[in-house]
Image (spheres, rainbow, N blue to C red):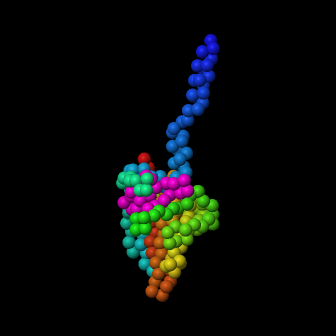
Amino acid sequence: MKKLILFTLFLILILVSCKNEDSIVNQNTLHELVPLKIGNWWAFQRINYDSTGNAVSTFIDTMKVLRDTVIQNERWFITNYYGIYRNATNGVRFWDSTNNSSYVYLYPVKEHDMFVMGSAIVEVISTNEKLKVPYGDISCVHYKATFSSLNNFHINYYLSPGIGFVSLEGPARTISGRSYLYYREQLVSYSLK
């Protein structure tokens, strides 16, 4: 009888200590700013504008996670679009091969957090900005990167945790120095493995 009680307690202990692996994966995915797995892809509609605000060209561009690699003993994911990425505990990092270093979109963040990303100062404009893109209405973290070395040239990045990049807006300047929206990329569709 004593052996049966000990065996039952042992079984209960094992069952209580086991975790549901699916729930762990789902919890981690929710905390990833950009879900990185080989085969994931995001399609964007890119519109280029002239200095008067007229659309001059529109096309679809796709970011695909092609394969992985190891850099400085860490697993990174190679894409066909804007480089090499990996998720870290403090956000998503991208690899700058010209400087052999990495930069990060911090996450989680609070509004008005600021950080350095390469030669830019990045401010978190909003942590819950509703953005209407061709895919639909998506809640995003809005990052504004300002490049002081380029006369305060700035780019707006919109990322949604668990989805990834949703929109990107880049300006240009006229000869007189007036800034205008040069291009906008917006999410049309995506597939996550």
Q: State the quadrant of the N terminus.
A: top right
How many numbered marks, from 0 up?
A: 0
Outermost residue, top direction? 1
Q: Name the side, left or right, on which 154 lies relative to 77.
A: right
- The residue that appears at 46% across and 83% down in the rendered structure is 174
Residue 150 is covered by the magenta coloring = no
- The residue that appears at 51% across and 75% down in the rendered structure is 147
Outermost residue, front direction? 72
- The residue that appears at 44% across and 53% down in the rendered structure is 74
Residue 29: x percent and y percent? Answer: 51, 48
Q: Which residues are magenta?
A: 74-95
Residue 151: x percent and y percent? Answer: 51, 80
Residue 5 seen in render: yes
Residue 79 is covered by the magenta coloring = yes
Foreground of the two, 6 or 15? 6
Q: Name the side, left or right, on which 149 lies relative to 42.
A: right
Quick check: 125 above or below 32? Answer: below
Foreground of the two, 5 or 171? 5
Q: Name the side, left or right, on which 41 lies relative to 14.
A: left
